[in-house]
Amino acid sequence: MIEIRLLSYFLAIAREQSITKAADALHITQPTLSKQMMELEAQLGKQLLIRGKKKITLTEEGAYLRSKAQEMINLMEKTESAFHTDEELISGDIYMGCGETPAMEFITGIFKGIQNDYPHVHFHIFSGDAEAVMERLDKGLLDLGLLLGPMQHEKYDYLNLARSDSYGLLMPRDCPLAEKETVSFDDLQGLPLIASAQAYSGRQRLELFGEIFDTLNIVATYSLIYNATFMVEQGMGYALCLANLVNTEGSRNLTFRPLSPALKVDLFIVTKKYQTFSPAAKLFFNRLRDELGNR
């Protein structure tokens, strides 16, 4: 089994691209660090480092180990922080993954209440689509995720936030379609559309849009709607996105129109089944349940 210490040494070399600089940062000697890395390569049976004259680069195997090693270090730090908790003063970290949704205003309101009462609790937000969030949940790198429904994965537990987001079309303010109050599915036919990568592939493609999705002209995809706004302004297409994510009141040539009939998606807090929460994460989850119970 690889020692965490060796992984930390390896990550330092990958970061500094130099054994000498990494040794200085780690406060060990250069020969000791070189010996440790040769032992690590021998243990794995793979060359990890390409030792050039000016800098050290990673082999393909080394690049793979770097990503996995960082995940392992993060998980170890997350686990250790859960034990550094005073019995009377809750501290530690809350790790949450989420997509882009206005519901984060509700979630951060709970965060703020915890911050006021327990200033030693820290918050870490990972932004990504459902697939990326669930992958990190599976690896134990996140305590919980905020995801758009519908949900069908049996290995997760869900808490319905009793909130929903609505889809619509982001478009140039001066285009003919902007004269309409709403956009119908017939209006979408033939338009160059920019869709979220999550909606473009996977289960949401059919569950949200049905068979009509295959008739749409998808010219581009995005992970973050902010980046897609520039494609819309450049006239590349119209972005299918959730309402209230883009500020259309400023000077930018953008406006939003909801779909009609309305296309809504429910929001869920997602955790792994049989999840054991850290004290900080348990505090958040309890406050979330209380908040939902009072509405």
Image: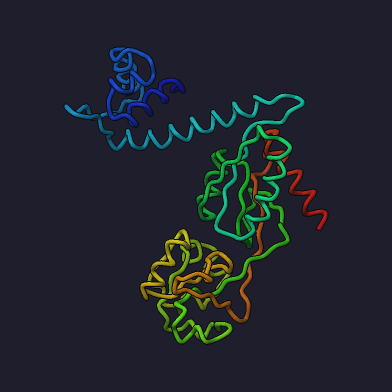
Q: Position of residue 208 (x, y in %)?
A: 58, 70
The residue shown at (57%, 44%) is 137
Which residue: 38% across, 29% down? 11
Horizontal side of residue 3 vs 96, given as left or right: left
Is residue 172 shown left or right of residue 243?
left
Q: Which image quadrant: the C terminus?
A: bottom right
Looking at the picture, tell me which residue is in the foreground, 127 or 5: 127
Which residue is pictured at 80% across the width and 48% down the height? 290
Q: Is residue 267 above or below residue 252?
A: above
Where, by quadrant of the figure, is residue 7 drawn? Answer: top left
| For residue 108, above or below residue 197 | above
Residue drawn at x 59%, y 26% as measured from the top left: 80
Identity of the residue furthest to the front in this view: 251
Q: To which quarter of the image does residue 283 belong?
A: top right
| Colour convention | rainbow
Quadrant where the N terminus is found in the figure: top left
Instruction: From this view, report whether residue 262 is shown above or below residue 112.
Output: below
Of 105 and 72, the residue lying toward us: 105
Front-lying residue, 210 or 140: 140
Q: Is residue 32 toward the left or the right of residue 3 in the image?
A: left
Counting every numbered tag in the picture gives 0
Image coordinates for residue 132, horizontal then vertical, percent? 50, 50
